[in-house]
Image: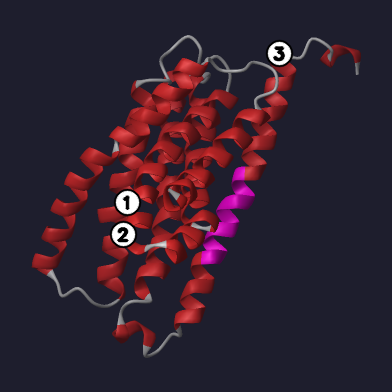
Amino acid sequence: MDLLALALAPGIAIMWFIYSKDRYDREPLKALVKSFFLGMLSTVPTVIFQVAATQLLDKVMAPTGWTYYILLSFFAIALTEEGCKFLALKWYAYPRPFFNEPFDGIIYGVMVAMGFATLENIIYVYQYGMGTAIMRMFLSVPAHATFGVLMGYYTGLAKFTHDTHSRQLMTRGLLLAILFHGLFDLFLLAQNDPAITRNISSGFLFGSAVLSYLVAVRLSWQAIKMHGALSRQQFDPTKNNH
């Protein structure tokens, strides 16, 4: 039970934090819960695509070196995970009437991301124990949240933009999530390759992963503030009195 609590805690805390930032037009609880469980369900196609992509990659090249880990991190992992989360966001929340302001992109993007990350976290924590639970509480689960914020920020803009530019914005959000997800995983996975760590220390690689995560956190916080300001302009009845 302790492990389960640790596995659930970071996702719940992050969802509550993001929900608390939606001050002016709170989303229906049913829609939030559905988005969370759609995030969980998106792990199924993700695993299928990841297994197929990894097997293909292992057939065409040796599982070592920077080229292998770049392809593994950005395409086999980041593209499949963020792509499936994006489809869950776009299929359910994006076309619905309750998605009525740009900040909703962040809300539902994070709900989907936390559904995905929470199920993934439960699996990892039960496999590897307390140390993994603590590490993922401060890194992996919040990292998924930042990817959800970045994707959701641009999805929120796209909802209220002309069709042609709308597609560009959604693509930008997806690519940005893939970029930071890929960088984060690349530096963490590269620590396992002796061919890489002969020349670059594991500490430097881990620090690079943390740095990419912190940059994503910074961009996510800016995105939350910007869409929060738009939300206030749209829904706060006292805005014209200041």
How far is the residue under mark 3 from the one under mark 1?
Answer: 40 Å
Neighbours of disc 3 within 10 Å: few (<14), some (14-19), many (20+):
few
Who's the residue at 55% across and 57% down the image?
138
Q: Position of residue 231 (x, y in %)?
A: 68, 21
Q: Which of the 4 image quadrants contains residue 115?
A: top left
The amino acid type, in three-letter code, at marker 1 is: Ile
The amino acid type, in three-letter code, at marker 3 is: Phe
Q: Which residue is mark 3?
A: 235
Q: Earlier in the sequence, mark 3 or mark 1?
A: 1
Neighbours of disc 1 within 10 Å: few (<14), some (14-19), many (20+):
some
Residue at the bottom extreme, as displayed: 198
The amino acid type, in three-letter code, at marker 2 is: Gln
Q: How many marks?
A: 3
Who's the residue at 43% across and 53% down the image?
3
| 216 inside magenta stretch | yes
Q: Position of residue 27 (x, y in %)?
A: 56, 17
Q: Left or right: where does residue 114 sit relative to residue 51? A: right
How far is the residue under mark 2 from the one under mark 1?
Answer: 6 Å
Whether residue 164 is visible, yes or no, is no
